[in-house]
Amino acid sequence: MLAHLARKLLLAIPLLAGVMTLLFFLVELAPGDACDAFVNPDMDPDAIAQIRASLGCDAPVLVRYARQMGNMARLEFGTSLAQQRPVVEVIAAHLPNTVVLSLLTIVIAQGLGIVVGILQSVHQRRFVDGALSVLTLFFFSMPGFWLALVLQLVFSLAWPILPSSGMTDPVVHDYMPPLAQAWDRLLHLVLPATALGLAAAAGDARYMRSSMLEVLQADFVRTARAKGLSERTVLLRHAFRNAMLPLITLLGLNLPFLFSGAVLVEYVFAWPGMGRVIVGAIQSQDVPLVMGCFFVFTLLVVAGNLLADLLYAVVDPRVRYR
Amino acid sequence: MSLPLLILASLWACADVGGTVADAQGRRDTLVIGVPSDAKNMLYVVSSSASDSAIIEATTSSLFDSDFSCALRYTPEMATEWSFSEDGTRIDMTLRDDLTWEDGTRLTARDVAATYALVADPKVGSPRLDMTEHMRPDARPHVIDDTHLRWEFTHAYDRTTMLAHTSLTPVPAHRLRDADPGSLRSHPLNALAPLSSGPWRVATWEKNARLVLAPNDAWTGPVEDRPRLRRVIFKVLPEYATRLVELENGAIDLMEGVLVADADKLATEHPEISLHRRGWRSMDYVAWNSLDPADVRATAGTRAKGQVPDPTRVKPHPIFADREVRRALAGALDVERMIADLLTSRVTGEVYGRPAIGTITPALCGVHADDVAPVPYAPDAARARLAELGWRDTDGDGILDKAGQPMRFTLLLNSGNARREKAAVLVQAQLRRVGVDVQLDKVESNAFFERLRRRDYEAALSGWSAGLFVDPGSIWGEGSAFNFTSYRNPRVTALIAQGLAEPDPERARATWQELQRVIHEDQPYAFLYWMDEIVAVHDRFQDTTIDVLSPYRRLNRWSVPADRVKYRY
């Protein structure tokens, strides 16, 4: 197992280098650069040159590429050109907010997806299955941005029971006792996590349904029923555990998607997470910050795959890594 | 009350936290302002955005306060009085002696001089470097003593503009003495916690989420200018729709840039929200590039990076280099129709736009050339004029042509601006009616500006925010980076130089009005419309200042009557 993990981690190095190279040149291809924000084009050319030099924008592109990759290899992410703060500091300030949002999203997505998938498989080709299929397809096809706006209009304006943005109440949170503060935080999580979670849950439910239907046809399920076990035991103890395997793969793959997919939802709900940092960094062509963010995302892809591998071994005793 | 909020209220009540209407100083309530982006810089010398300026204005004493009524007028703040020398090249200033920084250090003329030195230092990269260009090269203002300063200019020019060039907001010299000028943007005073010298201080700054202003109890300024609100909170809400939802559900109290259609909804459904107009703050126009973009690209290698093309060395644009063609095209655009479609209330019929005749805002009513009429909409006359100029539909395809070349061009516009996108479609349809084929090319904002700067476009739908003192050199000056159409007219160049050097306001006004007439004749742009900006604010706030200078100014004077307080804590 350890050797397998080590091999996977080693393979992540060229993957990271490739992603970083691609990103660097993609950002470079866009017109202008981060230093444009600091100079007025009508300024004296010498002053412009001095400002660009002080911000490190004057070097040729290959030199900047080599410098950037060298820094990344030493895990030095440098300073954000637009925010003038260390990249690590910017990421450290925003990553936890995205992690919290993503964890709750995973709980909603997997919890709801599993329940809906099982219900559909048990009631195959009946009204419940059809109705849930329509619902899951609806949420699966809806753009997250649109769903977020609709949730906001319904639950913050038409029927105002939930806060529409931010992580806490900006006015009274500071004056609340700890329990009320925790509840306030939870309330602010509901809409963004639901907007993200519903689409993911819809996908998970489709996988769960087909996986359950396949497993329910298997010999061991027939054997379990023949033994006289209750339908509940057959479903939850025998079929469910085996049907979970595709969802574990999905969990691993969904992890980075949840972080990057949160970009637009974070924007709508003003959630101060990585999504908004990335949008801002790309808009201002802030190469160090863009690369720092995507470094973290690429690591998450690798971590997601590893997590899926590990969970496979836990759930399926036939899987052994050498 | 909904269940979740009921639980929240119960949890709060259990903790026995009693809310009070006012604090010990009698300050009441909180103003929550929804803003699209967070502030980035707290030091005046490197600040660049409106978000930065709003915070700096509230937390720092400036040399001047200002008013606007047809013209910008400076009034005393830190500077109590000032006088110009006989020849107009020197300003002597007296400063208040009772102001201090939050840490107790006195705010003096030395802070102003240090601020000026940082603005003038290219290593700082201050966006305000151009403020120093008319000062003497040894330009650091002369500190006579802690409360007296002398400014010396190379020549006399418009006095308001001269004052504008001295109107610095001081930074704390004693805390920046050892700071590296090249790293000021990452200095803690800029990036983390500013040092206040004004009526407010930054109490909390959660980046990209909220910034909280609380009264600066150490402030030594006039008693009547002490804050009357307990807090002002800037809540960062990047999405317009979210800001609108929060304005409607009461989560925020103030929002700027409300669209006309949404203003209608607010007016009919939310009587507690009052709507304010900020007159003629911005305009849209269609820029006609006088240079051939293909030749601009072909000759790019002959210029230094960032240098604008020399119009004498690049081929002229086959359509737009001809002034008469530009004038005919302007006559084919129905600006009144655009205003009716884009800037008129469907409910009240109120109009939030007016046709533009130039780039000087009508808000500068003493300078704006009111006698110049917008180009009248006359498509038949436009088509006839184009025919006289040789543009006829010779091949029957519905598109005018001349010497085998169709009158076809690409109109560049930036994405993310719904109004301009609609305006571009109207321009396309209206020009099609006179036989001009317009293709729309929508690009991301950075790419859009870069192409304007490089002159790599044919026509562009863009806009300007109004300058509040007249300085047309940046838009129309030969060689200016912002002269996007590479417009050249020696008469205009002479008028700009004459107007900028004219200290007498009456004579300057005549020059600027003549300038507007000449430019309007030449039509380097098809000037479309000036717009009112709509600011929505909850009506419990009194003594508000919402004007052409800012959507929220003098926050220290804003107040709420005791019986209308919303937040008690």
Image (cartoon, helix red, strand yellow):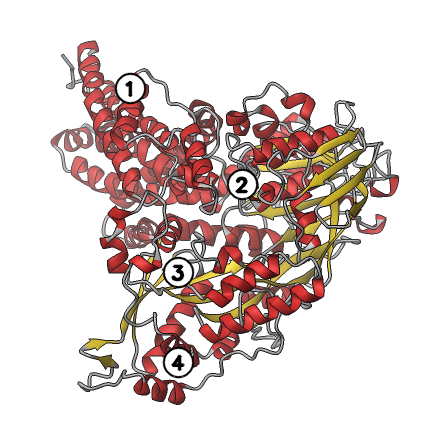
The percent position of residue B452, horizontal first and vertical second, equals 38, 55
Q: Inspect this view and state whether residue A184 appears.
A: no
Relative to A56, residue B344 above or below:
below
| Along the line of sight, the residue nearer the viewer: A188 or B499 | B499
The percent position of residue B95, horizontal first and vertical second, equals 80, 37
Circles 4 and 1: CB atoms closer than 8 Å? no
Characterize the local packing of mark 3: few (<14), some (14-19) or many (20 or more) Cα atoms within 10 angstroms: many
| Along the line of sight, the residue nearer the viewer: A103 or B311 | B311
Q: Please, what is the three-letter code of the amino acid marked with disc 3?
A: Ser
Relative to B452, residue B488 above or below:
below
Q: Chain of mark 4?
A: B
Quadrant for the C terminus of chain B, please.
top right
Q: CA distance from mark 2 to mark 4?
A: 39 Å
Characterize the local packing of mark 2: few (<14), some (14-19) or many (20 or more) Cα atoms within 10 angstroms: some
Q: Which residue is mark 2?
A: B127
Q: Please, what is the three-letter code of the amino acid marked with disc 2?
A: Pro
- Find residue B130 and name its label: none
- Between tags 3 and 4, which lies in front? 3
B455 sits left or right of B399 in the view:
right
The percent position of residue B400, horizontal first and vertical second, equals 26, 81
Q: Which residue is mark 1?
A: A70
Q: Which residue is mark 4?
A: B328
Which quarter of the figure has residue B80?
top right
Badge 3 or badge 2: first in the primary sequence: 2
Q: Which residue is mark 3?
A: B486
Badge 2 or badge 4: first in the primary sequence: 2
Q: Chain of mark 3?
A: B
